[in-house]
């Protein structure tokens, strides 16, 4: 967004946007706002602002955008665990999570609501460095944020550990896939999702259509088979064969077929744009362009 | 409502100011390097490796310290890896199979440029250990490859007067770019001790 546009543009009164476009609930994974540095909750207005600018009413908020430490302190990337300072950073992050009042999350929820927006999913990546107390607290945080489910980039071994927690809290966790086809612990194929879905009725899918396509899977076939267990779909465009991210419409992800299948069947599968291709423009501008691409399809 | 409007307007202004920055980082100083920066940004390399190579998001390799990047010449090592990708990683590096040879050459030049800048800043800021003149002499003739262009005698009259100036003389990327990209603090300290002795 250019400065003059920002100054000229006034946020609308309530409510800013319709709930659906062509009957589809759209949202955004806040990871898309690449110019909002993780680990600095003071940047939250830029997330709200980006959503308002893009005309997107709801989001899956990345934990790194509301917690005061970067994702590297939370153990998801195995490589980051090798850093000498990792145990200290991890313990500090754990203590913060266990001691921050739940009002902290409630206040974040209220900031979204005041802007006419909603946090629909909480994206936090469970892994083996979580303690049980931390797992418990994560569910409490998700409820305080007003989220309907947790979306998690995790692994099958951690999903097994999570079964008693989803049952206890009666709160869904949606597994998010990447496209590592080598490691059998990763979510990357229909079979890996199906293993988790069989573990608990509280397990759902966050189907990342771009990674799924890059792993040479058929996102539309998976959607048709498992739509009742898919919380949301990350809409992004990647080339097959582990190919790169591309602007919407230039990759191999069947975005149009996914959106029209959901629309025409009236399935309550939410579609969240995820901007991850390269650009010299701001993230807010690109997220808006991604949303426009989807809007045209939904209204076609 | 007035408060809400004020907050949103303030947030808008902040965001607009952020958006004024080039989303790809610092522009490169030459046309050729700018071509490389364009490939770097449009291929989204900076999301994982950072606008200055210092970031290692999503488990990415640290390109500032990668030995492979340090040994690369004109994309001869990086190019095949970029085209193949690294699909077995936890969050895989994509395969840029359609990148052209020219794009790989430009991208490689830009990555080396960022690395030289970054390593120079790191080495200048690092507290150097005490140097050893004997090891410095060995490095001069061996690992640092100084002897390929200089003799100790030819350097005596050209060495700068103060230690910080001599450090710059040794580390400023041009013409010592390969050394700057790969040098370790101990090696720098040893070479500086040897150059001090030469004076």
Image: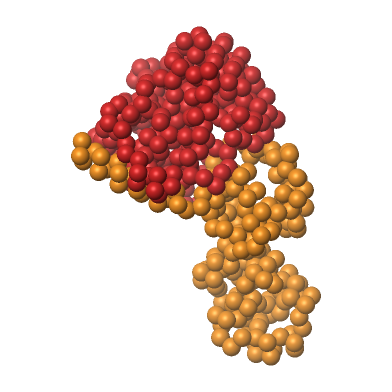
Chain colours: A red, B orange
Instruction: Using the image, determine if residue A161 lies above or below residue A260.
Output: below
Q: Position of residue A97 (x, y in %)?
A: 34, 38
Which of the two residues, B47 or B182, is positioned nearer the viewer here? B47
Which of the two residues, A15 or A139, is positioned nearer the viewer here? A15
Q: How many marks?
A: 0
Residue drawn at the location 69% of the way across and 80% of the way down: B134
Which residue is most to the right?
B148
Q: Position of residue A200 (x, y in %)?
A: 46, 14
Quadrant location of the N terminus of chain A?
A: top left
Name which quarter of the figure residue A194 lies in. top right
Residue drawn at the location 60% of the way across and 57% of the way down: B64
One can see residue B194 in this view:
yes
Which of the two residues, B80 or A112, is positioned nearer the viewer here? A112
Instruction: Using the image, determine if residue A112 lies above or below residue A262.
Output: below
Residue drawn at the location 63% of the way across and 50% of the way down: B38
Q: Position of residue A192 (x, y in %)?
A: 59, 20
Residue drawn at the location 53% of the way across and 54% of the way down: B25
Name which quarter of the figure residue A8 lies in. top left
Which residue is most to the top?
A265
Residue B12 as seen in the image, left or right of residue A299 = left
One can see residue A174 in this view:
no
Q: Position of residue A128 (x, y in %)?
A: 48, 33
Residue B55 as seen in the image, left or right of residue B67 = left
Residue B75 as seen in the image, left or right of residue A291 = right
């Amino acid at each position: 967004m250019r400065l003059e546009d920002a100054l000229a543009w006034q946020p609308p009164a309530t409510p800013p946007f319709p709930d659906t476009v062509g009957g589809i609930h759209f949202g955004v994974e806040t990871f898309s706002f690449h110019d909002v540095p993780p680990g600095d909750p003071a940047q939250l207005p830029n997330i709200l602002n980006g959503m308002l600018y893009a005309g997107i009413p709801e989001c899956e908020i990345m934990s790194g955008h509301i917690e005061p430490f970067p994702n590297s302190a939370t153990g998801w990337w195995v490589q980051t665990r090798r850093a000498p300072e990792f145990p200290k950073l991890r313990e500090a992050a754990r203590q913060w999570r266990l001691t921050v009042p739940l009002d902290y999350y409630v206040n974040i929820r209220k900031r979204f609501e005041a802007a006419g927006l909603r946090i629909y999913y909480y994206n936090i990546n469970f892994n083996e460095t979580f303690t049980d107390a931390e797992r418990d607290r994560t569910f409490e945080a998700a409820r305080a944020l007003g989220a309907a489910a947790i979306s998690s980039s995790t692994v099958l071994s951690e999903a097994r550990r999570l079964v008693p927690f989803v049952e206890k809290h009666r709160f869904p966790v949606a597994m998010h896939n990447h496209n590592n086809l080598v490691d059998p612990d990763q979510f990357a194929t229909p079979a890996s999702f199906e293993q988790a879905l069989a573990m608990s009725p509280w397990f759902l899918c966050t189907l990342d259509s771009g990674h799924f396509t890059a792993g040479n899977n058929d996102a539309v076939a998976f959607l048709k088979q498992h739509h009742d267990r898919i919380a949301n779909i990350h809409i992004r465009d990647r080339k097959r064969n582990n190919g790169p991210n591309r602007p919407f419409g230039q990759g191999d992800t069947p975005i149009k077929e996914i959106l029209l299948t959901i629309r025409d069947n009236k399935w309550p599968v939410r579609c969240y744009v995820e901007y991850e291709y390269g650009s010299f423009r701001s993230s807010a501008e690109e997220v808006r362009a991604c949303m426009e691409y989807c809007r045209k399809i939904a209204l076609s | 409502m007035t408060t809400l409007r004020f907050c949103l307007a303030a947030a808008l202004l902040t965001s607009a100011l952020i958006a004024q920055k080039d989303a790809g980082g610092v522009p490169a100083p030459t046309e050729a390097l700018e071509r490389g920066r364009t490939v770097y940004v449009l291929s989204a390399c900076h999301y994982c490796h950072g606008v200055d190579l210092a970031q290692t998001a999503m488990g990415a390799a640290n390109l500032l310290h990668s030995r492979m990047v340090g040994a690369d010449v004109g994309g001869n090592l990086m190019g095949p890896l970029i085209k193949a990708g690294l699909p077995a990683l936890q969050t895989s590096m994509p395969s840029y199979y359609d990148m052209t040879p020219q794009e790989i050459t430009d991208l490689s030049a830009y990555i080396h440029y960022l690395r030289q800048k970054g390593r120079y800043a790191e080495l200048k800021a690092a507290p150097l250990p005490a140097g050893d003149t004997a090891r410095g002499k060995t490095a001069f003739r061996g690992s640092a490859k100084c002897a390929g262009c200089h003799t100790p005698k030819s350097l005596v009259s050209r060495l700068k007067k103060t230690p910080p100036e001599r450090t710059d003389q040794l580390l400023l990327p041009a013409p010592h770019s390969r050394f700057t990209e790969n040098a370790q603090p101990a090696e720098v300290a040893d070479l500086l001790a040897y150059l001090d002795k030469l004076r």
